[in-house]
């Protein structure tokens, strides 16, 4: 029986900026939970909605991140936040927005292109990374805030944070529902970086682009797997993941797919960023 909250609504998947109530768990906030909250919070439309920008700033201040800066360039968005007390900076990259057609075009531009640090990467992801790296003062902001650097993002944002990790060598990279970004040679550019790669059960985005084009997931090869009940499993085998996914799809079809306002299939519902956050909040509170 599932005890972890699970949001099957289309709004939660396609309009994650509507989420509220960030950082309910503040005591001994782990890097991974901090990053998961930020990967959702960065969907707030800080570039166009002053109220949402202020909501994001106050949420970050509530956990000790007083210095907050946002970045927006040619459809790419991110924010950075700094805690002087812990000397920690977190940079979160926004994922795909259904209301922004440029994001959808970026996602499908899968041609492998050369990456300066080594290997080949998804052309669309590289373009969006360069929008921020070259078109904003994001890299300068990071240089002015030395200490521990955490990079994170959900979906497209996870891809951008991974490219950023190859370039910036952070203390930790935390990806939420990440697609594959590059080939094996690119994955090697991340050697030595601590990585938490979360995959929620049937999340379809974690299976694209297909490996037939040379794309691989970054190490560790086994993800931090969130099972169909919302529990985080470390070291889950391929057989366990396959069986758990089959049960999840069958249960979703029976109980949820037909509900008004719900996402049609479990493979998409599991990509919803708040469901990742619910799993990490549950783990922290256990």
Image (cartoon, rainbow, N blue to C red):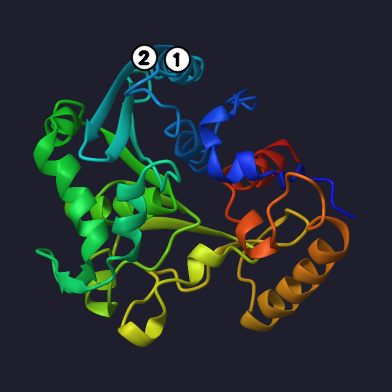
Q: Which residue lies at the image location 32% right of the left edge and 30% below the top edge?
A: 79
Quarter of the image with the C terminus is top right
Mark 2–mark 1 Cα distance, whole angstroms, equals 5 Å
Give 7 or 218, whichever is nearer the viewer.
7
Q: Please say whether residue 277 is visible from this viewpoint.
A: no
Where does residue 161 sit, x and y in percent of width and height? 32, 49
Mark earlier in primary sequence (2, 1):
1
Label 1, secondary structure: give it: helix
> What is the residue that sits farthest to the bottom in this orientation?
212
Where does residue 121 sit, x and y in percent of width and height? 23, 68
Where does residue 38 sit, x and y in percent of width and height? 46, 34
- The answer to which image quadrant residue 141 occupies is top left
Q: Is residue 245 left or right of residue 101?
A: right
Against 18, residue 195 (above or below) is: below
Against 89, residue 218 (above or below) is: below
Q: Dot 1 corresponds to which residue? A: 61
- The answer to which image quadrant residue 64 occupies is top left
Against 88, residue 36 (above or below) is: below
Q: Which residue lies at the image location 43% right of the left edge and 12% below the top edge?
A: 54
Q: Please say whether residue 221 is visible from this viewpoint.
A: yes
Q: Are marks 2 and 1 in contact (CB under 8 Å)?
A: yes
- Residue 176: mark in rendering: none
Q: Residues within 10 Å of mark 2 (few under 14, many from 20)?
A: some
Q: Which residue lies at the image location 37% right of the left edge and 55% below the top edge?
A: 104
Quarter of the image with the N terminus is bottom right
Q: Dot 2 corresponds to which residue? A: 66
Give 277 or 262, whichever is nearer the viewer.
262
Q: Is residue 80 left or right of residue 129?
A: right
Where does residue 21 sit, x and y in percent of width and height? 62, 23
Q: Which residue lies at the image location 28% right of the left edge and 78% below the top edge?
A: 184
Q: Residues within 10 Å of mark 1 (few under 14, many from 20)?
A: some
């Amino acid at each position: 029986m599932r005890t972890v909250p699970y949001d099957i609504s289309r709004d939660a998947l396609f309009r994650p900026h509507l989420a509220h109530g960030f950082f309910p768990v503040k005591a001994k906030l782990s890097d991974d939970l901090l990053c998961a909250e930020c990967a959702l919070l960065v969907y707030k439309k800080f570039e166009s909605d002053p109220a949402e920008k202020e909501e994001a700033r106050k949420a970050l201040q509530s956990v000790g991140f007083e210095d907050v800066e946002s970045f927006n360039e040619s459809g790419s968005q991110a924010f950075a936040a700094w805690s002087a007390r812990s000397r920690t900076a977190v940079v979160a990259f926004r994922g795909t927005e259904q209301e922004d057609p440029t994001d959808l075009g970026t996602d499908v531009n899968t041609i492998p292109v050369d990456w300066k640090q080594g290997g080949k990467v998804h052309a669309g992801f590289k373009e969006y990374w360069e929008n921020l790296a070259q078109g904003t003062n994001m890299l300068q902001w990071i240089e002015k805030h030395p200490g521990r650097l955490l990079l994170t993002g959900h979906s497209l944002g996870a891809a951008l944070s991974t490219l950023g990790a190859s370039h910036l060598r952070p203390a930790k990279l935390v990806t939420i529902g990440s697609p594959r970004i590059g080939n094996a040679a690119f994955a090697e550019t991340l050697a030595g970086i601590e990585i938490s790669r979360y995959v929620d059960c049937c999340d379809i985005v974690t299976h694209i682009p297909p490996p037939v084009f040379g794309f691989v997931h970054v190490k560790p090869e086994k993800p931090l797997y969130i099972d169909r009940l919302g529990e985080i499993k470390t070291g889950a085998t391929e057989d366990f993941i396959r069986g758990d996914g089959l049960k999840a799809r069958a249960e979703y079809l029976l109980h949820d797919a037909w509900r008004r306002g719900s996402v049609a299939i479990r493979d998409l519902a599991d990509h919803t960023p708040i469901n990742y956050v619910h799993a990490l909040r549950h783990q922290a509170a256990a």
